[in-house]
Amino acid sequence: MRYVLIGTGSISNTYVAALSGLEGSKLVACVSRSGRRPSAAPGIECCRSLDAVAAPFDAVIITTPNGLHQDGALAAARLGKHVLTEKPLAITRPAMSAMIEACARAGVTLAVAFQHRTHPDVLALKRLLEAGALGRIYAADLSCKFWRDQAYYDSAPYRGGLDIDGGGPFMQQACHNIDLYQWFFGLPDELVAHRATFAHRIEAEDHGAVLLRHANGMIGTIVASTAARPGLPARLEVVCEKGIVVTLDDRIVNWDIDGVANPGQGAAIAAAPNVATLGDSARHQAILRDFEAAVRDGRAPLADAESARRTVELILRIYGR
């Protein structure tokens, strides 16, 4: 497939690297309001709008800030182009609905780069949960105690704000992990959340905790932070009828489940949770492969828009919106 990048910030370089490993696929242009090209593709055609792109293309990859995702998706849908957007899908319910409806009318695929879903241990755990192999799930505790310094938030005027970032660590840094929580266990029937800003000069929270109750009785907890210096790996503990499972950065590190072999493959995600830029593109390449297969086969992608919408819905409920 031939791609146009919409947005040329640091994450765009991860997609340039991922595309370089996909045989037959390539980046043909970028769209940037500033006219800046990705540093990893300095010679690429750069336009101020998608309509101005001269090269033929099949799909867009949206890497603009959270609150601008809908602009790129709607522009692509008008041109009949498929859409892969960085997480989250969007930061408001109307924006998500507009994106989904526009892509459906245009008959194009809309997917979200929730690349943590592609980790082998995550996929194995998802299959076992769907099959009921762990028995009744009693509790799930997700801890995302990350760190960002003030310089990170000062690096762009929208960082840590509500209008563009959409919130603090719940919407931004812990979004991937909250997506896995929702993908595994669904939306809760009720929740209680507390949020505060402790360590940074930002509009949104930098630390918060949530208690969740699900229809099947499962009790969940989620902690999300960028105030936990120097930061810890994301940790998920699942307590169930047959034992306990613990993951760190999506890798199974403890498996004590009666009668079920540990499916973990031991391959950790390379990116540290306390680094704002990614140094490895393997998981993004996996998302791109799935995206292309979904377009080719006419099936839903691994992180389809409706599933990604539920993740944002959970975060919006945490924010009381």
Image (cartoon, rainbow, N blue to C red):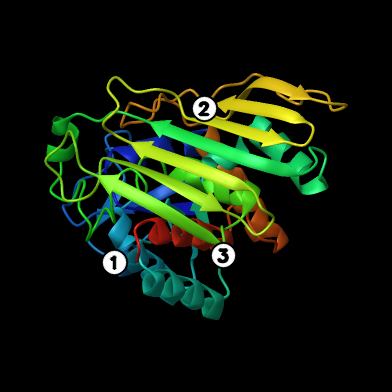
Residue type pointed to by label 2: Asp
Q: Position of residue 193 (x, y in %)?
A: 38, 51
Nearer to me, 90 or 134: 134
Residue with the mark numbered 1:
52
Question: Which dot, 1 or 3, sits closer to the camera?
Answer: 3
Q: Which residue is rendered at x = 45% and y = 74% of the image?
A: 97
Q: Position of residue 152 (x, y in %)?
A: 19, 34
Mark drawn on residue 248: none
Q: Position of residue 303 (x, y in %)?
A: 58, 53
Residue type pointed to by label 1: Ala
Residue type pointed to by label 3: Glu
**Vertical placement of 127 versus 310: above or below?**
above
Q: Which type of secondary structure does the marked residue at label 2 adopt? A: loop
Residue with the mark numbered 2:
249
Distance, label 1 to label 3, CA atoms, is 30 Å
Q: Which residue is rendered at x = 42% and y = 50% of the image?
A: 87
**N-terminal-most mark, 3 or 2:** 2
Residue with the mark numbered 3:
306
**Vertical placement of 164 versus 9: above or below?**
below
Give the residue furthest to the bottom: 105
Q: Which type of secondary structure does the marked residue at label 3 adopt? A: helix
Q: Which quadrant is home to the C terminus?
A: bottom left
